[in-house]
């Protein structure tokens, strides 16, 4: 493990490298489906970070290969000692070559893994290939005694791929319900308004849109608001085209709205809400956001079709409370600023965040 262990409780090159890799991967959540978002950092023997990269989009270089390219371009390949990756490196050829072989073509001595590949067809293959080639392989979750915040890091790595794991293991997309209510518990905005939440909540909603691959809505919501479902309050991924699943009948909607929606989305219809998670996964979606009215939201709840539930409540005394209900040990919502363990940015400081 060389010089990578922390001498103090607040200093660990491995921990810093993982945090850098996670942060970089978070930038591309919502752009990589059907692949997961993955980050990689390369370190020299002293633990200095040489390169940090993340997978940008399916069919493009994986995080490890992109980080290696950065090192090569800077003339630093000979200094590579360790690789830190949020997900076990792949050991198979898909649209890109195996990352294990790319790593083995360098002087890398050790590889730190944030979480194992959840795909049952390939799980463990990357780690075993690296070990067979004489490289040291470490899993961050096993080093809580020497790497500060190791368990938090491991949990964040699992949160990054939670929707990918759901699709691999269960053949379903991860479903997040976003529900905004006023002080009376109503989801219906006042007459003449489309929302009653703050600018901070709008930014949060658009950050969620940016991070998801699909939006699920109902015909009632579309008729009432004629929503665009575009990403406005934060910068979207370039040339991103999401799925828009509409629950209901096509004859219930204005043709002009459908024509505009088809310019920005791959529109699909769903006659039975129970089929939504499976149908979305078949189309390559990992993470879907429910933005709908009371009827569809209630149906999702009654049928237990959701994986996490974000509720934004306007408080009578002012301000807002954001609460999260989770059905699993980890949630991608934990990586969203203002919701997760990272400090909220000033625009979200009016929120009170709680987990229930």
Image: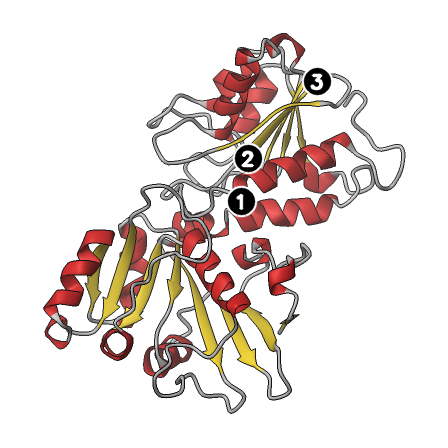
Residue bearing mark 3: 44
Residue 334 drawn at (x, y percent): 59, 57
Which of 286/101 is in front? Answer: 286
- The alpha-carbon separation of the residues under discs 1 and 3 comes to 24 Å
Q: Is residue 296 above or below residue 168?
A: below
Q: Disc 3 on helix, strand or loop?
A: loop
Residue tagged 2 = 39
Position of 62 with respect to 67 (left or right) is left
Residue name at image x 33 percent, y 83 percent: 295
94 up-or-down from 147: above or below:
above
Residue 349: give its label: none
- Percent position (x, y) of residue 337? 59, 56
Q: Upstream in the sequence, badge 2 or badge 1?
A: 1
Q: Residues within 10 Å of mark 2 (few under 14, many from 20)?
A: many
Instruction: Categorize mark 1 by other alpha carbons within 10 Å: few (<14), some (14-19), many (20+).
Output: some
For label 3, the crowd category at 10 Å Cα-Cα, with few meaning under 14, some 14 to 19 and many 20 or more, is: many
Q: Residue at x 47, y 42 (%)?
A: 28
Please tell me whether residue 311 is drawn above or below residue 50 in the rendered image. Answer: below
Residue 171 is left or right of residue 341, and the answer is left
Quarter of the figure that contains the C terminus: bottom right
Residue named by callout 1: 26
Q: Nearer the viewer, mark 2 or mark 1?
A: 1
Q: Secondary structure at mark 2?
A: strand
**Quarter of the view holding residue 5:** top right
Is residue 166 visible in the rendered structure shown here?
Answer: no
């Amino acid at each position: 493990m060389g010089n990578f262990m922390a001498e103090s409780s607040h200093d660990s090159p491995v921990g810093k490298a993982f945090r850098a890799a996670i942060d970089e991967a978070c930038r591309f959540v919502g752009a990589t489906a059907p692949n997961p978002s993955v980050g990689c950092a390369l370190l020299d023997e002293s633990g200095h970070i040489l390169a940090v990269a993340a997978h940008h989009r399916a069919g493009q270089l994986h995080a490890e290969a992109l980080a290696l390219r950065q090192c090569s371009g800077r003339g630093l390949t000979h200094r590579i000692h360790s690789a830190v990756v949020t997900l076990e490196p792949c050991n198979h050829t898909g649209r890109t070559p195996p990352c294990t072989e790319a790593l083995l073509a360098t002087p890398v001595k050790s590889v730190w893994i944030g979480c194992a590949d959840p795909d049952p067809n390939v799980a463990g293959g990357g780690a075993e290939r690296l070990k067979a080639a004489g490289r040291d392989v470490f899993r961050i979750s096993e080093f809580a005694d020497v790497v500060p915040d190791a368990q938090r890091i491991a949990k964040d790595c699992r949160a990054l791929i939670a929707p990918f794991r759901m699709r691999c293991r269960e053949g379903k997309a991860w479903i997040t319900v976003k529900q905004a209510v006023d002080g009376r518990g109503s989801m219906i905005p006042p007459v003449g308004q489309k929302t009653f939440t703050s600018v901070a909540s709008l930014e949060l909603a658009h950050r969620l849109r940016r991070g998801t691959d699909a939006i699920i809505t109902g015909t009632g919501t579309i008729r009432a608001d004629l929503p665009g479902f575009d990403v406005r309050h934060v910068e979207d991924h370039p040339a991103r085209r999401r799925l828009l699943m509409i629950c209901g009948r096509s004859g219930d909607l204005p043709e002009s709205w459908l024509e505009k929606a088809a310019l920005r989305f791959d529109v699909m219809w769903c006659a039975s809400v129970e089929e939504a998670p499976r149908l979305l996964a078949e189309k390559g979606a990992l993470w879907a956001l429910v933005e709908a009215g009371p009827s569809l939201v209630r149906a999702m709840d009654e049928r237990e079709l959701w994986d996490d539930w974000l509720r934004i409540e306007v408080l009578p005394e002012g301000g807002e409370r954001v609460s999260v209900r989770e059905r699993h040990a980890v949630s991608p919502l934990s990586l969203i600023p203002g919701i997760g363990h990272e400090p909220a940015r000033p625009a979200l400081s009016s929120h009170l965040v709680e987990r229930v």
